[in-house]
Amino acid sequence: MSLDILAIAAHPDDIEQTCGGTLLRMAEKGYRAGALDLTAGDMGTRGTPEQRLAEAEVAGRHLRLHWRGNLGFPDARLENTLSARMTLAVKIRELRPRVVILPYWEGRHPDHYRASELGYEACFLAGLKKLDEYSEPHRPYKVIYASLYANVTPSFVVDISGQFETRMAALLSYQSQYGAQGEGGGLFPQEQEIGERLGAVARFYGNLIGVKYGEPFVVKETMQVDDIVNMGVRSI
Ligand SMILES: [Zn+2]
């Protein structure tokens, strides 16, 4: 298997919230995009791990994912251990993505920033020839960080105006999380509320580049420009 893009996140539905529109847009361009969820979200108030895995499958079809997997690491207590790094590194060697999308490296939920660190270190390890003798070394060319929930200026924003509605449908596939009924009703936003909230966030980032809806990303390297006559986003 050789993917163009692999998004790695802590919980099923993180990817739909932070970079689902971008994955769909890239799939529409013909790229093979995949998603790897590190935990099955088994500590969540609502839904069983089996339910969330089934929902992730449906959501992945909305996003036209070429591949989706779940490593079944422990939810809410994700640790960046040697064994977790090795497991993830071997998976990266199998999937051979050119671009990896990770969660932003700071956040409220410990799983999110641990997933970010674990993802980065696994990408590095994946490139070591002697890591394991059964898989070929592979180091992703580019690591980008989905920064939707981080209060930081993005390095760039992807226009997802054409993908926004499908991305919302993908997110709402997680009926155990966003459905109206069930226990824990006070904790989770209902469908309309989450639609309004994510719509407002996507409008905010879209507005930064002069489009309707956008998804923000941060890169640690400087972005290169080869043609300053054809740069996007109007200044005046
Ligand atoms: Zn999460």
Image (cartoon, rainbow, N blue to C red):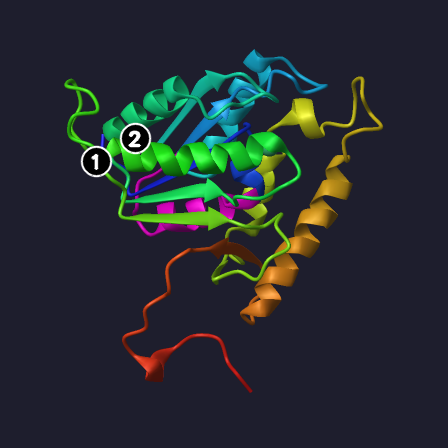
Q: Quadrant of residue 180?
A: top right
Question: Which part of the image, by quadrant, shows the C terminus?
Answer: bottom right
Q: Where in the figure is residue 179, as x and y percent of width and height?
A: 72, 27
Instruction: Mark 2 and ligand 1: say if the CB distance to the nearest ligand atom is below 8 Å.
Output: no
User: Is 33 contained in the magenta span?
Assistant: yes
Identified by mark 1, the residue type is: His
Instruction: Say whether residue 185 is left or right of residue 151.
Output: right
Verify whether residue 166 appears in magenta.
no
Q: Residue at x 53, y 56 (%)?
A: 216
Cβ atoms at labels 1 and 2 below 8 Å apart = yes
Q: Is residue 20 left or right of residue 189?
A: left
Q: Is residue 57 visible?
A: no
Disc number placed over residue 126 in the picture, else none: none
Q: Answer with left or right where residue 48 lies relative to residue 39.
A: right
Q: Position of residue 155 (x, y in %)?
A: 47, 62
Q: Nearer the viewer, residue 10 or 207?
A: 10
Instruction: Name the residue beneath numbered marker 2.
Output: 92
Amino acid at the residue labelled 2: Ile
Dot 1 corresponds to which residue? 138
Closest to the observer, 188 or 128? 128
| Segment tinted magenta in the rendering | 18-34
Asked whether residue 39 appears in the rendered view, the answer is yes
**Does any atom of ligand 1 lie closer than 8 Å to the CB of label 1?**
no
Give ligand 1's quarter of the image: top right
Callout 1: SS: loop
The residue sitting at 60% across, 61% down in the picture is 205
Is 82 rendered above or below residue 151? above
Q: Residue at x 59, y 15 (%)?
A: 51
Front residue (pair 136, 27): 136
Residue 232 image position (x, y, % from top left): 43, 75
